Amino acid sequence: METHYGLPLNLPVEASAHARQLDNLTAIVHWFMIVLFVGWGIFFAYSLFRFRKGRNPVASYEGAKGHFSTYGEAAVVLVEVILLVAFAVPIWAARVGTLPDEQNAVRVRIVAEQFAWNAQYPGADGVFGRTDSKLVTAGMNPLGLDPSDPAGKDDVVTLNQLHLPVGRKVLINLSSKDVIHSFFLPQMRVKQDAIPGQVIPIWFEPTLVTPPENSLPGCAVTKTCWEIACAQLCGITHYRMRGFYQIHDAAGYEQWLSENAPKVAAAPVAAN
């Protein structure tokens, strides 16, 4: 359990560079709501006592003439503006205003569909293979990869599995084939709607390798992973849209890429 500003939030473990900022903001908002709850509760109790029937047997149609409630509401609005302008907007702008350099980032293309997550990694050439919606077939070619494109012959494609390295920026291009889904990585503090017809870039930097104790049914061979959730009701079997992701150390990630890269046949050697 992570604790911020003395308030236990029971949030998932912080595993990305920006997680602490978001958790701190969440803690501040919770403290603010506690103060509001206690403050308005005290005011309500005072009003019940101050304007009780025994002290006010005759109704007063003029009402209270103080400005306490006005000042209180103005203070609440001021705090909300500060939270929005000084905290929320800068955090949001930092995530969407500038994307990491593609040359140094780990790039992944994720396409959501009812009810699965399809992931594509560029191969050693660093270029995504061409895709065509006319080539999409359920099960065999869910991404519509063009087999005639040389750039795609070394691409790594996974279903409901996402593997990433620790300590490197990750740039994901997110889209959907059918309806609106929501790509949610709780430990990374990442949540983004996948919208049909749009490719939405999201990025984050993992800071923690997935602990060995995180063993979930349905994981890859290692059985060490966190869950990819769809946070948007997307159909009658939305509950089945469950994926898994694992953060590796540098060596582990390179090993995973090597083991899952397509076996490209070597060109025949011409006879002398």
Image (tube, rainbow, N blue to C red):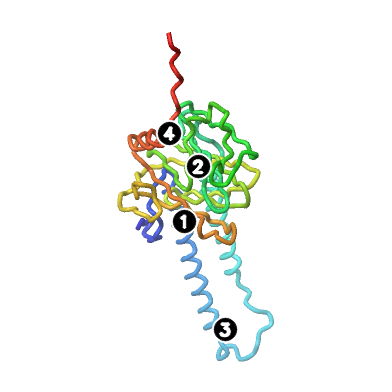
- Crowdedness of circle 1 by 10 Å Cα count: few (<14), some, many (20+)? some
Instruction: Depth check: give the residue in front, 74 or 260.
Output: 260
Q: Residue furthest left?
A: 212
Q: Which residue is mark 3?
A: 51
Observer-nearest of 200 and 113: 113
Query: Which amino acid type is marked by label 2?
Result: Ala
Task: Give the mark toward the camera: 4 or 2.
Answer: 4
Say whether disc 1 or disc 2 marks the residue closer to the N-terminus: 1
> Camera-side residue: 155 or 76?
155
Q: Earlier in the sequence, mark 4 or mark 1?
A: 1
Q: Would residue 67 appear left or right of 269 to someone viewing this image?
A: right
Seen in the picture, residue 21 relative to 235 is either above or below; the reply is above
**Which residue is label 4 attached to?**
261
Expressed as whole percent of the image width and height from the top left, the position of residue 233 reads 57, 59
Residue located 48% across and 46% down the image: 159
Disc 4 is placed on an element classified as loop
Residue at 50%, 74% in the rendered image: 41
| Cα–Cα span, label 3 and label 4 | 76 Å
The residue lying toward the viewer, choosing from 39 and 191, is: 191
- Kind of residue at badge 1: Thr
Q: Which residue is mark 2?
A: 119
Instruction: Indicate the position of residue 239 as horizontal and vertical percent values.
Output: 51, 60
**Residue linked to disc 1:** 26
State whether residue 240 is above or below residue 126: below
Q: Are marks 1 and 2 in contact (CB under 8 Å)?
A: no
Q: Where does the image place residue 118, in percent across and percent down from the top left? A: 52, 44
Kindly identify the amino acid type of the residue bearing the numbered disc 3: Phe
